[in-house]
Image (cartoon, rainbow, N blue to C red):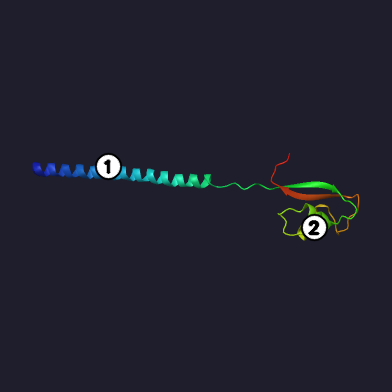
Amino acid sequence: MSREQMISKRKRSAQVLQQKVMLIIAAIALIILCSSVFGGLLTSAHGSRSEEPVNYKYYKSIEIESGDTLWSIAETYMTDEYSSVGDYVEELKSINSLSSEEIHEDQYLTVAYYDTQFKK
């Protein structure tokens, strides 16, 4: 092999090495760029989420007055979480272990309601 061929071969090897180094640097730069862009998108997606208030379920004891019915009590204490007055009446019967809708004056009844305020 002549000297010129050896010099030419070294130059090609150097060029190939230089191309490989440039390719590696470009790949690393692309990875960093993608990480920054997608990481920023994920962060902004989580940061822009509006938090909805948490509804807590509470129970309260009330004294039944003359003329009260489960339906009138349901209309007074029912919150939007119940789909109908009938559903709330069924809830009242369940939590008070009532087998019928019959209630009496001076009797105590547990009612359920929801509120977004946390009460200790």
Give the amino acid type for the residue marked by disc 1 in the picture.
Val
* Label 2 packing within 10 angstroms: few (<14), some (14-19), many (20+): many
Between 12 and 95, the one nearer to me in the picture: 95
Q: Position of residue 2 (x, y in %)?
A: 8, 43
> Could you tell whether 59 is left or right of 39 in the image?
right
The quarter of the rendered structure image containing the N terminus is top left
**Residue drawn at 82 percent across, 54 percent down:** 73
Do labels 1 and 2 touch, CB within 8 Å? no
Residue 87 position (above or below residue 3): below
Indicate which disc residue 89 carries: 2
Where is residue 76 shown, x and y percent of the image? Answer: 79, 53
Does dot 2 land on a helix, a strand or a loop? helix
In the image shown, does 81 or 67 lie closer to the viewer? 67
Residue highlighted by disc 1 = 21
- Residue 55 image point, x, y percent: 68, 48
Q: Residue at x 80, y 57 (%)?
A: 89
Q: Amino acid at mark 2?
A: Val
Residue 54 left/right relative to 6: right
Image-based side of 58 in relation to 10, left or right = right
